Image: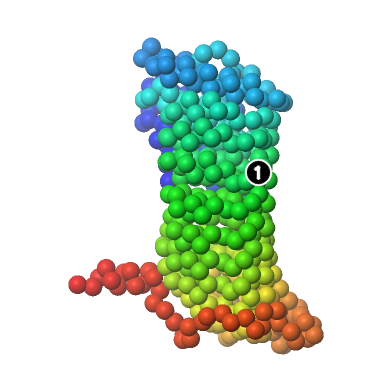
Amino acid sequence: MEKWWFLALLLLIANPTEAGFNVGGGVGVNVGPVGGGGGVWIGGGINGNGNPPFSSGSSPSGLDRAFTALQAWKSAISDDPSKVLDSWAGPNVCSYTGVFCSPDSQEVAGIDLNHANLKGNLVQELSFLSQLSLLHLNSNRFSGQIPESLRDLTALQELDLSNNNFSGSFPTVTLQIPNLIYLDLRFNSFSGTIPDDLFNRKLDAIFLNNNNFEGQIPESLGNSQASVINFANNQLSGNLPASFGFMGTKLKEVLFLNNRLTGCIPEGVGIFTDIKVFDASHNSLMGHLPDTISCLEDIEVLNLAHNNLSGVLPDLVCSLKSLVNLTVAYNFFSGFSQECTKLFHRNVGFDFSLNCIPGWNMQRPDPECSLIPGGGLNCLRIPGSKPLVCGSLYTSSSASSP
C-alpha cells in the first residue's frame, strides 16, 4: 500500500512554488480501512485555492480538451449544494477547485472531489483527460453507468468511486484501464458476481466492501498481486477459494467478514503469506482450524467470530507472536490449550465467549453444544505440529542454498 501515496507525489516536483504549481495545502494520505471514502489526496482537495494560470509554455490542445471534458461533466451535475463547481468557469482549468495540473506536461493530472456532495453522472468526455493519474470521487451522490470510455485513461492509476449511488453489475471497464493499481468501489449498490479477471490485474488495493455482490469468490483470487482486499458486507457465498492460501507474501490485509461463506478454511492459509489482518467473522465457516495458520507469524488481528468452527483451539494459533487481537467468539470450540491461557498475560485481546468450552463462563448452553453444525464436515487436515514448511522460511532457505 505504500505506493498509493507515492503516486500522488509523482504529481509534485521538488519545489512546486518555483514551478508555478500551487497545491493549496500540501500532500496527505487517507487510506482508511472499512469506513467509506479513502485513498490519497493531494493539495487542498475541494478546499484548495486552485493553481495559477498555465504559463505561456503550456499546451493549448491538452488543456482545451480538458476544458471540454470538465464543462461536459459540469453540465451533468444536477446538484452542488456547497457550490464546489462555481470555480469551474473559463478556460483556465488548472484553477478549478479539485483539479490539479502537472507542471511538466501542462495537462490535468489529478481530480479530487472527495466529500463534495455532488449529485450527477460521469460522462464519456472524461476520457479526454489523457494524463489523468488519479480520480477521487468518494462521498458524493454520483449514479448511473461508469463510462466505457474510461478505458482510454491510460495514465490513470487510482480510481476511488466509494460512497456514492452507483449500482448495476461490476463495472468491468475498470479492468480495462491498463495502469490502474488502486480500485475503490465500496459503499455503493453494485450487485452480481465478481469477475474472474479482477484478480488477474496488477491491482495493489481492491475495495469491494459494502455492496451487494453475490456468488462465489473466484478461484483466480490466488493470482492477485494486491496488498489489501476487502470483501466485507456483501452477499458472497460458497467456500473460500483453495488458492487463497497460496497468494504470496504481498498480501497484508484481507477481510471476508459478514458474508455467507461456508465450508472449511483452506489448508494452505498461511503457507505463503505474511498477512497482518485476517477477518472472516460473521460467516458460516465450519470444521477445525488448519495448522498452517501457525505460519502467519506477522498476523496482528485474527477474527473468526460468529462462525460454526469447532474442535480445540490449538497452541499453534495462540502462540503466534505478533497477535494483538484474537477473536473466536460465537463458535463451537470445545477447548483451548495452555498456550491460549497465556494470551491474557501478553495483553492480547482474546475473546472466546459463547463457545462450548467446559469450566469457563459465558459459554453456550449444553443443548446447543450437543449438535455442532457441520460436525461431519471432512476438512482435509495434514497432521503434525508444523505440518508444512512455511513459505517464507522455504523461500529464505532456498535462497541460501548453494
Q: Note whether residue 342 is visible.
A: no
Above or below 276: residue 119: above
Q: Is residue 354 visible?
A: yes
In the image: residue 94, left or right of residue 360: left
Q: Residue 51: where, in percent of width, then height? A: 49, 21
Residue positioned 41% across, 31% down in the render: 12
Q: Which residue is mark 1?
A: 168
**What residue is drawn where x is 62% and y is 46%?**
169
Residue at the spot x=46%, y=86% of the render? Answer: 384
Give x and y (percent) for residue 67: 52, 18
Residue 401 lies, in percent from the top left, at 23, 73
Number of numbered discs on residues: 1
Amino acid type at circle 1 is: Gly
- Residue 256 against residue 287 in the figure, above or below: above
Q: Quadrant of residue 97?
A: top right
Question: Which element type, helix, strand or loop, lies under badge 1?
Answer: strand
